[in-house]
Image (tube, rainbow, N blue to C red):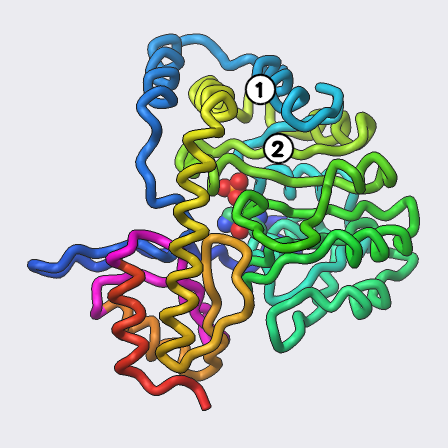
Amino acid sequence: MVEPLPHVREIPPYVPGKPPTAQPGLTTYKLSSNENPYPPLAGVLATTEQAVAAMNRYPDMGCAALYDALATKLGVGTDQLAAGTGSVALIYHLLTAYCGPGDEVVHAWRSFEAYPIAVTASGATGVRVPVTADGRHDLAAMADAITARTRVVLLCTPNNPTGPALGHAEVATFVAGVPEDVLVVIDEAYLEFVRMADPVDGPALLRAHPNVVLLRTFSKAYGLAGLRVGYAVASADVAGALRAVALPFGVSSVAQAAAVASLASEDELFARVESLVAERDRLVAGITAAGWWVPEPQGNFVWFDLGERTAELAAAAGEAGIAVRPFAGEGVRVSVGEPEATDRLVELLGRLAPPA
Ligand code: PMP
């Protein structure tokens, strides 16, 4: 038998959010994957249909239209951008380009479940720094975890699945203390949902520190999860390395067209984000009124830290027609979705005893 490299057997599985189970007479809701509940904008759909009509051709490998639009939006050079098949691909590209056996990658835990998968796949060693009891990154402990072997630090803000976001001042202080030959990757998948006094200004950090990398995605606020397009903003050197290791033609022509059309439709899309933020506030108010607690959510999801009661809440939500994302023995993540789903979830929480 031909064996894969030993570390391949160590790669933990990715557990995707499941769809709801159909129930007669009951509208069901999928709140298990932090998706945008709104359907595509008609204009974006029309643009993608044109791209579909030309699907016999390869996509533009240089993503020229996408990089032009992003460079204008962000005030960076087109050479500072690298697109990929979702921002999860950029995590792989980063670790492929910068890490190998013997290297360490520091990240918070619990955080995005793709981190240990991508770190292990790269052959490097993950160093997990526990989040605080209120679901926040422990930046002091993360700074202490950096050793001579550390090549990359991953910050996730807002943190999936716990919810809180980091502030600019604390990240600026953290980055200033990280050696210049260590990359600080700031995963901002849920950036557009953040409403706080001092949000991270990623481009400003990058201007001051060329070892900063920002990861962003069209999957959440822009509602293009099914098309798979995300990007990194970095120094030209780092962006060049990310492009070098990327799969050729990794971002499809349809995804590129939809992303460019979405950037041109930010007014409409961000009005939807505003509605989701209002729905998040309504959900938190309902959760609190029912006697439950969640860490401050800054993304489009909330986190119930439930330990052994995780399966109980997940099962009760499933019976109520709502698919949530349980993390066995740890907690339940619930995406912000349709108002009817919020009402049903809050009603359900009112019937269950909150954790002591
Ligand atoms: N980062 C975080 C924190 C996420 O939660 C996700 C998606 N769940 C991603 C990155 C990846 O998103 P995508 O690959 O769809 O861009």
Q: Where residue 87 sits in the image (x, y, percent)?
A: 58, 39
Q: Tell me what residue is drawn at x 49 percent, y 72 percent.
A: 294
In this rendering, the answer to whether 292 lies above or below 24 is below
Name the foreground residue: 169 vs 255. 169
Res. 10 visible in picture: no
Q: Could you say where residue 108 lies in the image, as x and y percent from the top left?
A: 68, 63
**Circle 1: residue type:** Leu
Q: Is residue 286 above or below residue 4?
A: below
Q: To which quarter of the image does residue 223 belong?
A: top left
Left or right side of 354 for 58 = right
Name the outermost residue toward the front.
Answer: 197
* 210 part of magenta stretch: no
Q: Where is residue 138 in the image (x, y as percent from the top left)?
A: 73, 68
Residue 91 shown left or right of residue 221 in the figure: right
Query: Would you identify the image quadrant in which residue 156 lies?
Result: bottom right
Point out which mark residue 231 bears: 2
Residue under the image location 34 percent in, 75 percent down: 313
Residue at the image position 61 percent from the left and 13 percent from the top: 64
- Mark number for residue 1? none
Q: Nearer the N terminus, badge 2 or badge 1?
A: 1
Q: For residue 238, which quarter of the picture?
A: top right
- Magenta highlight range: 319-340
142 relative to 149 in the view: left or right: left
Q: Is residue 80 left or right of residue 309?
A: right
User: What's the amino acid at mark 2?
Assistant: Tyr
Residue at the extreme bottom of the image, as rendered = 356
Q: Do the residues labelled 2 and 1 touch (CB within 8 Å)?
A: yes
Which residue in the structure is indicated by mark 1?
Answer: 66
Q: Is residue 326 magenta?
A: yes
Q: Nearer the viewer, residue 209 or 106?
A: 209
